[in-house]
Image (cartoon, rainbow, N blue to C red):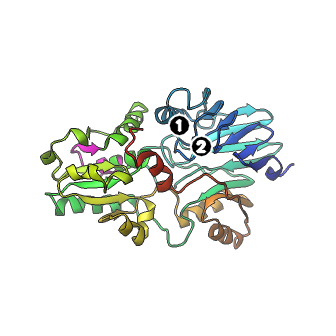
Amino acid sequence: MPHPSTWLRVLPQGLYCEPGGFFIDPTRAVDRAVITHAHSDHARPGHGAVLANADTLALMQARLGEGRAGETRQALNWGEVLHVGDVRVWLEPAGHVLGSAQVAMEYQGTRAVVSGDYKRTADPTCPGFVPIPCDVFVTEATFALPVFRHPPPEQEIGRLLASVALFPDRTHVVGCYALGKCQRLIALLRGAGWDRPIWLHGALVALCQVYEARGVALGDLRPATAAAKDELVGAIVLAPPGAVADRWARRLADPVVAMASGWMRVRQRAKSRGVELPLVISDHADWDELNATLDEVGAPEVWVTHGREEALIHAAGKRGIKGLALRLVGYGEEDEAEDAVEGAGEAC
């Protein structure tokens, strides 16, 4: 049986499955691409044929526009097997955002799984991560340091609501990314009993509409730009990270600036962004979850695409798991990658 390293290779465009003739999350336009999810550093424009979960295809079309999300697009249901050349290909949920998938591939008796970005914490807006036993597991390592242990998201939402109660005359504006984090925050707020309107920066509206069209109920959402200033007193406003400290936020009533990100664990990062209320809510696996996932899938070998590779490979090696740092170029940290799209206030 050929080892996956003989048929799954790193090329300048990204990970390439040679017997299937396709790339996974290529960083430049290619003829055939399998896309794990619709974040801008994984779903690029200009591909020929695109294969992905139907939710990802809908989000890609909303973000990239008709014609730029792939000349042809094919949706694959969870667990549905497709033969691409001599390779069996199927998708399972990654739990990162709506439509986020792991790509499982079998070729001549060996199996490799490319997990994309993923998290293990339950999320009401997307299916949860499904562990897939494999010979090679390809993982991210965004938060692969022991310092990153995410608190329960409900705890952080509780902190936000406690601050709203403490400062009823101020507007709470929460920086969050348009795809995934925004909708998850809304769902968490609804789950915590917040049934009042949630106000949105214009850049967040379109993807919330896609979520709702795909069956994710978000409740009463309103455009913040259409609100009178007194309507926003005591309100919660969601906006892209790049907008919470710019001129746009001046319309808000003495705003409390919050930010929802795994990086809010790093106090200096919160301070540098002028964040008064850091909320540690991440759509990536933390240190413990990354390591637990390696043990669950049982792969004797792990390849790390990007992030804090060294620490994760060292921890895996102590448990007898061989590690390899792929150091793929073009995949950014959650905030840098999405700020490039949303920070300028684009209605994506």
Q: Indicate left or right for 116 with 165 as reference.
A: right
Examine the image and state in which quarter residue 85 appears.
Answer: top right
Q: Residue at x 51, y 49 (%)?
A: 96
Q: Position of residue 318 (x, y in %)?
A: 70, 73
Does residue 95 show up?
Answer: yes
Task: State whether residue 110 is above or below residue 159.
Answer: above
From which residue to which does the magenta span run?
187-200
Graded by Cα atoms within 10 Å as few (under 14), some (14 to 19) or many (20 or more), the crowding at tag 1 reads many
Task: State whether residue 182 is above or below residue 61.
Answer: below
The foreground one among 150 and 181 is 181
Q: Quadrant of the C terminus?
A: top left
* Element at label 2: loop
Graded by Cα atoms within 10 Å as few (under 14), some (14 to 19) or many (20 or more), the crowding at tag 2 reads many
Q: Indicate left or right for 251 with 211 as reference.
A: left
Whether label 1 touches label 2, CB < 8 Å: yes
The foreground one among 315 and 267 is 267
Q: Position of residue 9 (x, y in %)?
A: 77, 49
Disc 1: which residue: 56
Q: Residue at x 82, y 45 (%)?
A: 109
Q: Residue at x 55, y 43 (%)?
A: 37
Q: Amino acid at mark 2?
A: Thr
* Element at label 1: helix
Q: Residue furthest front?
A: 247
Does residue 193 show up?
Answer: no
Q: Amino acid at mark 1?
A: Thr
